[in-house]
Image: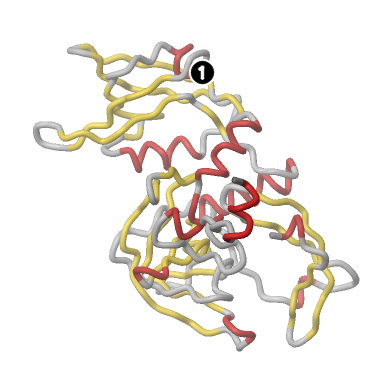
Amino acid sequence: MTHSANKLWVEWRGVLLDAKSVGLDPLTTVSILKIEGDFKSKNAPVVNMDSSSDLPRVATILMALSYEMGLPPSPRVGLATAHNIEFGGNFLPTVYVRTSIPAPRGSTGGAVFDLNGKFAGMTIASLPEIGGSFILPAKAAARIRDDILLCGEPVYSWFGLQAEDTDGINSTKVVVRMVAENAPAKKAGFMVGDEILAVNSKKISNNTQLRNITFFVRPGETAEFKIKRGNSVLKLDVLAERMAPDIIRAAEKNISPPHANIGDGQIPANKSESTSQPKKEDTAKND
């Protein structure tokens, strides 16, 4: 993690350039580094992070660049296999794209492109048990980048509700299962059992779409929810609030992918594998 590193550097054409951390998102573990000294960025190629990019569709062919074991950059090709908002029973900070691209050590943080050469996201964690990886989509990465550059840290919004997918007659429904007390959703009039139909005029068919849309609503902005309650269709305006530090800390503990193994971004098969067991002598002392 960059915030606890003794020294940071960027390697450019065999030269190690001193760098410093500008900011860190503890939930996605995305860091921004600034190269110090007289390095001229105009001499380096850059990747355009298009903030209007949509999520790569499932079955899209993707190519990831990796830098394992100090070797030159090498491409790995695979498919976008799913859009995930949780893993191992824990919620992710936003929608991650699961891919079939292996991510060995040295791969996390690498750029991922589609076949048109467009930046699709960055490798955020390895899924060694299935030979795949999670990528943070380009639009989400751009939002986190902008927050860190403007505010020094990511600024997450909080609505204070939880929803889940349930089977409808002909399709999936997104139904509210929890509304926190004194939360923006509660103040707007949300109730458990409400069916969410749309947010800001964008149709909601599943919880993944809901999470993807609300992630880009900033604190202080109002999101218009179209809901169904019984036989009535209502519109509720929810004023998003900034997520409190204690909520972020709690989320950080419960988000396993980026934190299962910080060194190489690998995710264990289950929670027990990410928890170090006490040695026998330590156990004896505790008893």
Name the residue: 86% across, 67% down. 36
Residue 260 position in % (x across, y down): 53, 58
Query: How far across and how far down the image is residue 273, in percent?
Result: 46, 60
Q: Nearer the viewer, residue 96 or 277?
A: 277
Q: Residues within 10 Å of mark 1 (few under 14, many from 20)?
A: some
Q: Could you tell me how many numbered marks the image carries? A: 1
- Residue at the location (41% across, 29% down)? 200
Quadrant placement of the C terminus: top right
Asked whether the viewer can see residue 69, the reply is: yes
Nearer to the camera, 90 or 122: 90
Which of 107 and 262 lies nearest the eye of the viewer? Answer: 262
Q: Is residue 35 left or right of residue 120?
A: right
Please tell me whether residue 239 is drawn above or below residue 245 in the rendered image: above
Q: Quadrant of residue 194?
A: top left
| Lateral position of residue 35 relative to residue 114, left or right | right
User: Would residue 61 be seen by someone viewing this image from the given angle?
Assistant: no
Residue to which mark 1 is pinned: 183
Residue lying at the far left of the rendered structure:
169
Q: Position of residue 184 (x, y in %)?
A: 51, 18
* Element under disc 1: loop
Where does residue 178 sit, x and y in percent of width and height?
A: 37, 23
Instruction: Locate the N terminus and report the quarter of the image it occupies.
Output: bottom right
Disc 1 residue type (three-letter): Ala
The residue drawn where x is 49% and y is 26% is 159
Image position of 203 with respect to 208: above or below: above
Q: Is residue 23 above or below residue 73?
A: above
Indicate left or right for 192 with 121 as reference.
left
Q: Residue furthest right?
A: 37
